[in-house]
Image (tube, grey):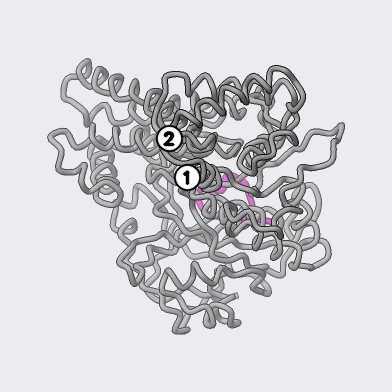
């Protein structure tokens, strides 16, 4: 099949700054055309914010662009190279089944990567077929858009397009391409790739580019590369705290899955926790719980230390001094994370101001939730609604004592009770993408061609803090099961 340029007036406005970096960082190639592209789902509001025509994207030619059969005018497709520690083991990697079409410049002057995921083999495919299945692509669409609605920095999903082809995994599956939108796809692993296989000049070029793209204010610092490290640390501390506060488990926090923009990236075996347990693991390949919910802050710090190591040649000419600067910066992460997390917990509990006992109040509640196998999201939802008697801890003397402490703290806080309730409503989602609901939607879409289940789920998740009656059915946890929920790589 011959790949043709797109002539559709969609509103593409590419700049391609990443393509102007040395070709050490990527390989230029076009997407592999597919047999019969058909649009499955399109994010209309996101398209509009990008300056794109929804009508044009919904046309046959628009589907051809989103599937990789046609390249938009001005795009310069490439596969990015990077490395990474995968479950602690270092390896050279790259976009094995994704291509960066380019960077869309929006009407507001913002810059976003446009990436096709599942677009065919690349030089980094490592014997893979470069393709993706419809179910996992729809799953990333649902979860990433839910994360955005929750107010968590994330890559987003513009579209999922069926390819009309089957791909072979454990069984034959319908193929699809996801169009992912990101502030950028620069990862800790991108710097690891430069440090392992490039020159100091390659590393400096990448660091300068990252500063210009994401942290222009830090570029003016006396030590711009130390400023870059500190800014990345700050954003990651905030991001991981937000994950913990909503019970999100990434599942595969390899260094190649940590974006320097501070966005959540790569929705592989991720899921949201139902019953509160810090040891919760969903990923089928995380045998030892490296990326369990309770370990995520620790792993983030470990990943950031790997990032700091790549910057050592830039931090200072003297190696010992460079190491000291890096260590001092990394040591700030834990405190930054804890401050973000505690501020978030105060909001979830409706607390105003600060009290020295606030951390104990929050952790004691979590301990009770773990002891009584309480649902994480619904515990805070019921406290927000003023219905603590419906929580799993209700009727126990320990919970009664905790409620007394909480109420005493609320009374002593500055501000009216209504302000506390509103703070809780804006901090505790009424709904999350429950795993059983996501699977229900994917099963209907993939096995029956019924998108209505997914559409209703997306509508419920679009405003998770609304506390609307129609969201109630999506707030219910799954029925008890002897089989733990498992997610799989391959998205």
Q: CA distance from mark 1 to mark 2?
A: 9 Å
Q: Secondary structure at mark 1?
A: helix
Q: Is residue 277 magenta?
A: no
Crowding at dot 1, Cα within 10 Å, few <14 / some 14-19 / many 20+, comes out as some
- Given residues 222 and 337, the one toward you in this image is 337
Q: Residue 287 falls in which quadrant of the image?
A: top right
**Stretch of the chain drawn in magenta:** 121-133
Q: Give yes or no for contact between labels 1 and 2 (Cβ–Cβ under 8 Å).
A: yes
Which residue: 87% across, 31% down?
Answer: 482
- Given residues 150 and 450, the one toward you in this image is 150
Left/right of residue 33 with respect to residue 411 in the rendered view: right
Does residue 31 appear anywhere in the picture? yes
Q: Which residue is mark 2?
A: 352
Up-down relation of residue 133 to residue 292 (above or below): below
Up-down relation of residue 296 to residue 191 (above or below): above
Picture disc at residue 419: 1
């Amino acid at each position: 099949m011959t790949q043709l340029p797109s002539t559709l007036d969609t509103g593409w406005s590419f700049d391609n700054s990443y393509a102007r970096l040395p070709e050490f960082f990527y390989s230029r190639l076009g997407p592999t055309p597919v047999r019969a592209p058909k649009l499955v789902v399109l994010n209309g509001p996101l398209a509009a914010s990008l300056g794109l025509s929804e009508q044009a994207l919904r046309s046959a030619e628009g589907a051809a662009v989103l599937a990789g059969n046609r390249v938009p005018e001005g795009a310069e497709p490439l596969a990015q190279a990077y490395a990474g520690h995968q479950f602690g083991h270092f390896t050279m990697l790259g976009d094995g089944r994704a291509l960066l079409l380019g960077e869309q410049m929006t009407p507001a002057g913002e810059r976003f990567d446009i990436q096709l995921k599942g677009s065919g083999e690349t030089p980094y495919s490592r014997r893979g077929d470069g393709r993706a299945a419809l179910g996992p692509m729809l799953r990333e669409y649902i979860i990433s858009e839910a994360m955005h609605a929750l107010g968590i920095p994330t890559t987003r999903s513009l579209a999922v397009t069926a390819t009309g082809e089957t791909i072979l995994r454990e069984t034959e599956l319908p193929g699809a391409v996801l169009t992912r939108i990101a502030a950028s796809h620069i990862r800790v692993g991108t710097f690891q790739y430069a440090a392992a296989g490039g020159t100091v000049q390659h590393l400096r070029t990448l660091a300068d580019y990252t500063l210009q793209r994401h942290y222009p204010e830090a570029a003016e610092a006396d030590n711009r590369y130390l400023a870059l490290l500190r800014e990345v640390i700050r954003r990651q501390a905030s991001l991981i705290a937000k994950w913990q506060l909503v019970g999100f488990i990434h599942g595969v926090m390899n260094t190649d899955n940590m974006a320097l923009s501070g966005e959540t990236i790569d929705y592989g075996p991720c899921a949201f926790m139902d019953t509160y347990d810090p040891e919760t693991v969903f990923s089928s390949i995380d045998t030892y719980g490296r990326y369990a919910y309770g370990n995520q802050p620790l792993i983030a710090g470990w990943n950031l230390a790997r990032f700091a190591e790549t910057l050592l040649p830039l931090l200072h000419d003297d190696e010992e001094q460079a190491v000291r600067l890096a260590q001092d910066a990394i040591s700030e992460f834990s405190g930054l994370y804890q401050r973000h997390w505690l501020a978030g917990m105060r909001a979830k509990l409706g607390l105003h101001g600060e009290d020295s006992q606030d951390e104990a109040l929050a952790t004691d509640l979590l301990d009770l939730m773990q002891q009584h196998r309480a649902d994480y999201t619904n515990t805070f939802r019921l406290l927000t609604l003023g219905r603590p008697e419906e929580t799993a801890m209700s009727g126990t003397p320990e919970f009664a004592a905790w409620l007394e402490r909480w109420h005493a703290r609320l009374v002593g806080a500055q501000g009216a009770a209504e302000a506390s309730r509103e703070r809780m409503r804006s901090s505790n989602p009424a709904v999350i993408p429950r795993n059983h609901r996501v699977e229900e939607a994917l099963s209907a879409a993939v096995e029956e061609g019924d998108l209505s289940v997914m559409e209703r789920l997306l509508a419920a998740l679009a405003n998770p803090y609304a506390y609307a009656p129609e969201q109630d059915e999506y707030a219910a946890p799954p029925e008890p099961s002897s089989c733990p929920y498992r997610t799989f790589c391959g998205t």
